[in-house]
Amino acid sequence: MDDVVLRARLVLMLLMLVHAQDQSLGHVDPLTLSRADPRCWESASVVLLEMRTPRIAHTVPDFWDLMVFLKASDNRKHGALFWDLAQVFWDLYVDCIRSRNHGLGRRHSIRTKRRLTVARSLSADKSFVQESQNHFSNLKEFTQAWFQIQVQQDGSRSLQ
């Protein structure tokens, strides 16, 4: 009996695997999705419109008309642009859903972006770069001294 159940589970898993391979991996077509959260749908659309320069549309309905056109087009560049925009939209939409449902997502992303901005501004600051070079030379001297101590403790000759 257990053998039959195990085989049935294996067959079901294989069917699910075949079905998953039939779908485009990594591609979520927003045109075929039901709008689970209309506020997040609208919010993600607006954020995507604001992110793009030059602007690809001025209103959300115009944006979705453009998306329908891009998807229906036979031009490969249009298809690539559709999937790029769809991926960015999907990331924004899922982030909004997570943020609303769990309190995660958007706040975490904004915090990460702030950290990256600070790191970039510090690395562009000449005094920070100079200070980092001084720390590197101090680290190099410390490392050389540490290796010298390790070699002497092992009874070998000192590296200089």
Image (cartoon, rainbow, N blue to C red):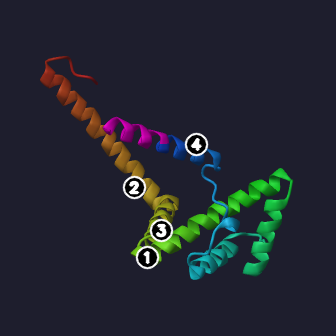
Which residue ends up furthest to the right in the rendered image?
Answer: 74
Which residue was labeled with disc 4? 18
Looking at the image, how many numbered discs can be counted on the residues? 4
Of mark 2 and mark 1, the one earlier in the sequence is 1
Residue contact between numbered discs 4 and 3, judged by CB atoms under 8 Å: no
Q: Nearer the viewer, residue 45 or 23?
A: 23
Q: In the rendering, which numbered label is found on residue 131? A: 2
In terms of sequence position, does the residue under pointer 4 or pointer 3 come before the other? 4
* Front disc: 4 or 3: 4
Crowding around mark 2 (Cα neighbors within 10 Å: few <14, some 14 to 19, many 20+) is few
Where is residue 23 shown, x and y percent of the image?
64, 50
Give the Cα distance between marks 3 and 2: 29 Å
Q: Which residues are magenta?
A: 1-11
Residue flagged by tag 3: what amino acid is it?
Ser
Q: Which mark is residue 101?
A: 1
Q: Write the residue at 49% across / 67% down.
A: 113
